[in-house]
Amino acid sequence: KDFIFALHDPPRRSHLPTEQTTLYHTTFPTLTSKYFATTPWPSPRSVSTECGGDKLFLALYTELTARHLHTVSRPSVRDRIAGWVVYRNLFDMLLEHVESVAAGVAAGSTAQDNDDDAGLYLLPEWSFDVLHEFVYQFQGFCQFRTATFAAAARTSYSSSESDGADGGGGGGGGGSKKTPSPHVMESLRVLSDHRDAWAVESVLDYLHRFVRAGCGAPPSASATTNSASPASAATRLSEVIARAGLAYRHLGLFASVALSRLECLLGDYTASLKALGPVFDVTAPLIVPPIPPGGGDDPTGGSGGGVGVGGGVGGSGALTPLDFVNSVTPARISLSYHASISYLMLRRYRDATSTLGTIATFMQRGFKTGQLRRDPHSDQYGRQYDRILALLAILGHVCPTSDIVEEGVMRVVRDRHNGQLNKIDSGEEGYEDLFLFACPKFISANVPDYSRILAPSVEGGAATTTTTNATNAIPTGQDAYRLQVRQFTTEMEIQSTLRKLRSYMKLYTSIDVAKLAAFNDVREEELVQILLTCKHKTRQVQRCDGVSLSTATTGGGGGGTSVADAGDANGGTSGDDDGPLGGKLGSSALDVHFYVNSDMVHVDEAERQRRFENYFLGQIEQ
């Protein structure tokens, strides 16, 4: 109870980051491992007296302790639905508060918060953990729902097939019909009774509302839809955050990262990149961390932190949105990983390579210095680093990496995946194995038709007919996952042909079409089609060198997430697509450029820039 009393003070009263850091990162794990390693923490009702019955804090406490229990146990279907109730109650309470404050600010109200409500402050890590776990539990629920329904559907279908064979296709098989196991049927009944639990529309709505509350506008909103000027919008956002609490600014930015991850898992890669718009908005208000009493001047006029108006770096300790997100290592890795997957699936290979190369360099240096190995999430970082290296191995065959990724990173890639890369070079399959290892676990958010299993027709033969008509689409539990893998492998089959073509063109400055066709064992007419395909498949949208959206300088090893390596000051793929989705169409993924004139293919290999820093870095490492 002393811990609950102490934990209530920093988020709701004192807003001191140092106290909250100790309690969240040290005291809570210590008490958990000592007293609640495999058991739940005390219920919110039993500890309510230690926080004065603060409903918002009790909702945060419920989420924190439920997250722990979800981690150390294998959740049942009822546990998963209970998790949805926990997040729904917490998010409704948070959003109701900040949206009422925003309505008051928009109406011109000058009333300040009640004395009993000093706003809310959560550590950036705590804010990210809440939203990250929210998406993680949604992903787990979708996988559980799909796998459970698929298992029941396969059992019912195999039973119908055997009944049809035994009865000559007739209706009354003779009592040998199989049914799914009792626990599967019970799970299906619970899922059917709670169809609205973890509905994708509700999950997306919560994340968009957090983005709107903490960043001033939803990621899909056009600037032209706001009648107010950007300066007045930033001022209004600053006022909302000052009244409601800096936690809502944190939640808004991390909701953008979580939304990007969710859209990637659902296979909407354009939306995944577009969701990151608020993180890369250079005109967004700066984040000013809370300043302890006596710790210096507060640019916002108080001691509770807030947001400053305008873009660029300024103020004491003020952070741009990207710098702020990069200050939380799991958020930085999640942003870079899912953005690079989206770039890869959208055929923006150079942007994907740049994004992965930068985060791989950051993680490599973090492991060497021990910074990441001391982190409680070090095991997860190691697995994520392995996935990133596998993705770089794929991209190294599709897109030249010598001028994008540091040599030290590519050396590790070659050491780990040299065998598979040699298989690909020899014409064998290898891309799919790498992608299966490196890609996220894509999900399907569709709600199955439970009546196919729970309420089959009892009229003679009808059940068999209904099931048989649906057998062409019997779910496997991996349909969404396999769809994305199949999309990737189809594209890589084309890239393998183009890689062979590129290897021949690098040997010539000009070559006869007939000769090049003979090298590739195809007819001249087919070669022309392949050349056109090569031009089309390697022409891509790419971020341009020039105005940098943001450069992160947070600790642990240089650079920022290269989603923002370069901004396009003059436009993007469309007028509204700034940030990670922006870029110019026309650049080639290859380092070989060619054109066809009459019966000759003229080749112009891109000039290589001589770079010496990798040599010196390699010597220093030795």
Image (tube, grey):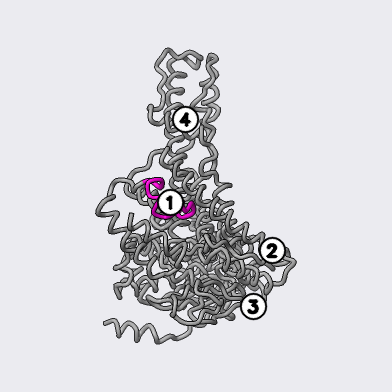
Residue occupied by mark 3: 569
Q: Earlier in the sequence, mark 3 or mark 1?
A: 1
Which residue is drawn at the image coordinates 37% and 68% (left, top)? Answer: 19
Question: Which is more foreground, mark 3 or mark 2?
Answer: 2
Q: Which element is circle 2 on?
A: helix
Q: Amino acid at mark 4?
A: Arg
Report the Cα–Cα distance between label 4 and label 1: 26 Å
Circles 2 and 4 in contact, beta carbons < 8 Å: no
Marking on residue 63: 1
Magenta stretch encompasses residue 47: yes
Furthest residue toward left? 34
Circles 4 and 3 in contact, beta carbons < 8 Å: no
Report the Cα–Cα distance between label 3 and label 2: 32 Å
> Which stretch appears magenta?
43-62
Closest to the observer: 187 or 18?
18
Q: Which element is circle 3 on?
A: loop
Q: Amino acid at mark 2?
A: Ala
Report the Cα–Cα distance between label 3 and label 1: 42 Å
Q: Circle 2: is it few (<14), some (14-19), or many (20+) Cα within 10 Å?
A: some
Closest to the observer: 394 or 89?
89
Question: Which is more foreground, mark 3 or mark 1?
Answer: 1
Report the Cα–Cα distance between label 2 and label 1: 31 Å
User: Is any atom of residue 236 visible in this view?
Assistant: yes
Q: Earlier in the sequence, mark 4 or mark 3?
A: 4
Residue occupied by mark 2: 106
Determine whether, in the image, residue 526 is placed left or right of residue 52.
Answer: right
Closest to the observer: 313 or 349?
313
Looking at the image, is 71 positioned above or below residue 241? above
Closest to the observer: 461 or 35?
35
Quarter of the image for the N terminus: give it: bottom left
Task: Pinpoint residue 179: horizontal percent, then vertical percent.
Answer: 41, 24
Which residue is drawn at the image coordinates 58% and 63% (left, top)? Answer: 113
